């Protein structure tokens, strides 16, 4: 009797294995890249900028942010409220830059502040990579026709928690790092007025910016976890009836 390969069946077996392989490599690289970026942030290799907002005492916005200063105008008109020349030199911009909002940064930060400030660069990579690694066994069993295998619901729940924790880190990290960065800017003489003091206190404040799309992924994973848990329970009940 002659036996031969079934191309369709072979493809069905290779596709899950390929998906698992791609997920393993991608998740591992994401974790490695996240750890690398975290190391760079501690050693000063990453720019440590955080979202800030100018307060009402610095209302003049352009490509650079110029606070109002008594006796100095850009277009012949004045603006209020205005700082005194002793507080700030006219025409000197605030130490912030525009990038979809205002960002401020400082050098020589302590490791904790640097890690929090750069959390969006490394936190998402590590959380996403770990979630992918957790899901690999679930992908493997699903590919073999056992989506309700023991432990899959727990793995999906763990992946959901990792995504949520990563979202919390990248959202809250820069906001928590902003106060010491702003204090460093206020104390830095390079932003000083004529009297040699630093930038006046309260001219810029922390600004929390929230990215919502990771919660959509967490919601999808959480829904799959609930469905898998229910499916596993129904499968166990069916087996008990047989």
Image: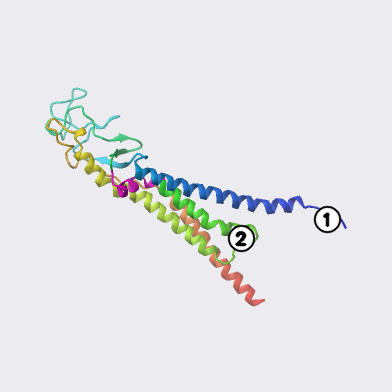
Which residue reaches farthest right? 1
CA separation in Å, label 2 and label 1 = 28 Å
Q: Nearer the viewer, residue 114 or 162?
A: 114
Query: Is residue 81 shown above or below 34?
Result: above
Bin the neighbour count of mark 1 within 10 Å (Cα to Cα): few under 14, some 14-19, many 20 and up: few
Residue ID at (53%, 47%): 26
Whole-percent x and y of residue 52? 28, 42
Q: Which residues are magenta?
A: 109-121
Label 2 sits on a secondary structure element that is: helix
Residue 49, picture quadrant: top left
Whole-percent x and y of residue 103? 31, 38
Q: Nearer the viewer, residue 15 or 223?
A: 15
Q: State how the image is colored.
A: rainbow
Look at the image and tell me whether residue 229 can be seen.
Answer: yes
| Figure quadrant of the C terminus | bottom right
The answer to whether 76 appears left or right of 218 in the picture is left
Query: Is residue 98 shown above or below 242?
Result: above
| Figure quadrant of the N terminus | bottom right
Q: Nearer the viewer, residue 121 or 70?
A: 121
Q: Which mark is residue 141?
A: 2
Instruction: Check disc 1 and report the residue beneath it.
Output: 3
The answer to whether 42 appears left or right of 151 in the picture is left
Residue ID at (61%, 60%): 141
Q: Is residue 120 magenta?
A: yes
2 vs 1, front mark: 1
Residue ID at (19%, 40%): 187
**Prevalent SS, magenta region:** helix
């Amino acid at each position: 009797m002659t036996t031969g390969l079934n191309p369709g069946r072979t493809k069905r077996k290779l596709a899950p294995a390929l998906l698992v392989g791609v997920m393993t490599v991608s998740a591992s690289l994401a974790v490695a890249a996240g750890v690398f970026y975290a190391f760079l942030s501690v050693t000063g290799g990453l720019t440590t900028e955080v979202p800030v907002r100018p307060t009402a005492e610095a209302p003049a916005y352009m490509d650079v942010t110029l606070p109002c200063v008594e006796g100095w105008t850009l277009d012949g008109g004045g603006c209020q409220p205005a700082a005194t020349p002793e507080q700030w030199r006219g025409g000197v911009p605030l130490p912030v830059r525009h990038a979809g909002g205002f960002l401020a940064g400082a050098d020589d930060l302590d490791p904790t502040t640097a890690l929090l400030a750069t959390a969006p660069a490394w936190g998402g990579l590590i959380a996403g990579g770990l979630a992918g690694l957790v899901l690999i066994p679930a992908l493997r069993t699903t590919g073999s026709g056992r989506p309700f295998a023991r432990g899959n619901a727990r793995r999906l729940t763990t992946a959901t928690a990792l995504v949520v924790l990563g979202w919390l880190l990248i959202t809250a990290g820069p906001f928590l790092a902003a106060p010491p960065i702003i204090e460093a800017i206020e104390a830095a003489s390079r932003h000083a007025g004529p009297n040699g003091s630093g930038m006046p206190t309260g001219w810029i404040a922390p600004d929390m910016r929230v990215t919502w799309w990771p919660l959509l992924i967490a919601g999808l994973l959480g829904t799959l976890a609930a469905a898998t848990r229910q499916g596993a329970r129904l499968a166990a009940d069916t087996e008990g009836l047989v």
